[in-house]
Image (tube, helix red, strand yellow):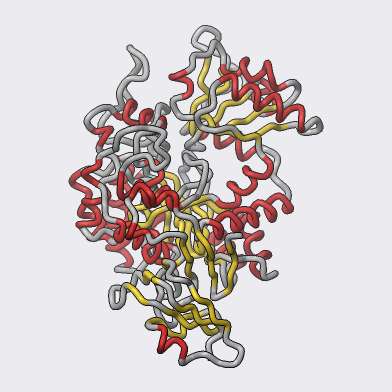
Amino acid sequence: DADKIFTNGKFYTVDTNQPWVEAVAIKDGKYLYVGNTEKALSYRGNNTQLIDLANKMAMPGINDAHLHPTKGGIRKLYSCNFSFSATPDEIAETIAKCVKQNPDALWIRGGQWTSDFFNKFKFDSPRKFLDKVSGDKAVFLQDDATHNAWVNSKALELNGITKDTPDPAGGTYVRDPETGEPNGILLEHASQSMFTALPEWSKEHYRKGTLEAIRIANQFGVTGMKNANARELTLATYKELDESGNFNIHMATSITTNYGKRVKLLNYDEIDRLRNTYKSENVHTNSVKIFMDGVPTASRTAAMLAPYTLAEPGDEPTTGMLHLEPELLTKDLIELDKRGYAVKIHVAGDRSVRVVLDAIAAARKANGNSGMRHELAHAGYIHQDDLNRFTELQAVVDLSPYIWHPSPIMDSVVSAVGSPRGEQYWPIRTLVELDAPMLAGSDWPAAVPTMDPWIGIEAMVSRADPLERFPGTFWSEQAISLAQALKIYTSNGAEALGLGDVTGSIEVGKSADFIVLNQNLFDKPITAISDTKVKMTLFKGDVVYQQK
């Protein structure tokens, strides 16, 4: 007997053997039957719950395979937030309000200012601008990429940063050209080192932030997530919540490693300890995060094969930076691959993409085909000579479709990289045609204000702004079909979580993770995809969200 039977639906299964069915039967959280209503009803028993979907579309739950859920939940609940489009006056007003509302706080942290903010708005001193509204508080504001920060004098003072402080390896304290004093802008490792020195959020903050992220995810139809950079306290929070029965999500975790310049091999035994200590039924710890470069925005810190445009006349040309020497990365990757880790590597520039593909090739040669699917996160710029290598090496392209359209962050990227190379960003259609492995992620709360997957799905197909804020399209020749986009967000995402045999499609024996929608996606113009609302979300056969 089934526990639940859903009938009279339009189930898009993402299973090529039967793409559409009208009914499913569920037992013990798994699909017992997938097919027609008559056969599904044969599994009805005295205690079976029968649900009529009234001809609504259903599909597998979404797998967001690159985001920072706990960080996003904490930021939403506790940080001082403003929109990417905020003006200096709006930011000043927001900071002053947060200072007033938090009289006992030492730090005010939040964001996010857009990458081109200081090109668009000129300041005599960004640091002094914040000083005027921050009182006795230290202020730390991240940019939209979360790689760079804007701070006030108090923040610099608490961290002992003066005009005589040398730049950290892999980072820059931007300075006043006349006095040499730090002007409040911290790039790359300068920002990350201060971020790690901030007072740690409490265990309760982590718990509530995680629960808030899962609540938001279920509301959008997300049933699987991959935390792209999980610290130990995050891992501990996930295991505790899972074992207490408060974890309505499949969660894969990329165990964090040091950000910025590193000259020593990773501590593999410590990574093994974290994996073995914190894995649980719904928490999957077989992934590691490595950072190879920065971002190709106005900061010009992603590692590129050709020089960026000059930020100012007379500047020295730059191709960005590699955080790790290729030889060190290769040694790390070979050992992690041998130990059974899928490594997610931040690579935003075409030079770092090539270096990582070389390292994966070395791992394949050393270990054979381990089955580990190593992911190149944000690999938007790929040299023509390297496109085929993703398929050959089974290296996974980690896509960020939420920004594949005209927007301030893309304006910043194109301006820094230069034309025509700048516009040749995210060759997704070419990669689909090459049958390259791929996944999609929101990267929330970095770069985007929401993890809403329907925005990303529409942008994949249209290459236009789904919210119609910015006109035009971005490299529309690389648009893909709706069916291709849904596969990337469902079954491909499940593979990225290491759960391809467990979830990601509606098939007998798989976990009953599916969502019911307010519209049939295939009956609507592509511009309506971002308007999609989830009526119901099921995780392991249980309803974890229902629209009121």
- Foreground residue among 274 and 144: 144
- Foreground residue among 304 and 530: 530
Q: Residue at image x 25%, y 39%?
A: 475
Residue 13 placement (x, y as % from top left): 37, 71
- Foreground residue among 23 and 90: 23
Q: Residue at image x 41%, y 30%?
A: 408
Whether residue 509 is visible: yes
Q: Quadrant of residue 138?
A: top right
Residue at the extreme front of the image, as rendered:
54
Q: Is residue 138 left or right of residue 375?
A: right
Q: Residue at image x 40%, y 39%?
A: 293
Residue at the extreme right of the image, as rendered:
104
- Foreground residue among 196 and 508: 508
Residue 253 placement (x, y as % from top left): 52, 59
**How many numbered markers are drawn?**
0
Residue 33 placement (x, y as % from top left): 43, 85
Quadrant location of the C terminus in the rendered image = bottom right
Q: Quadrant of residue 546?
A: bottom right
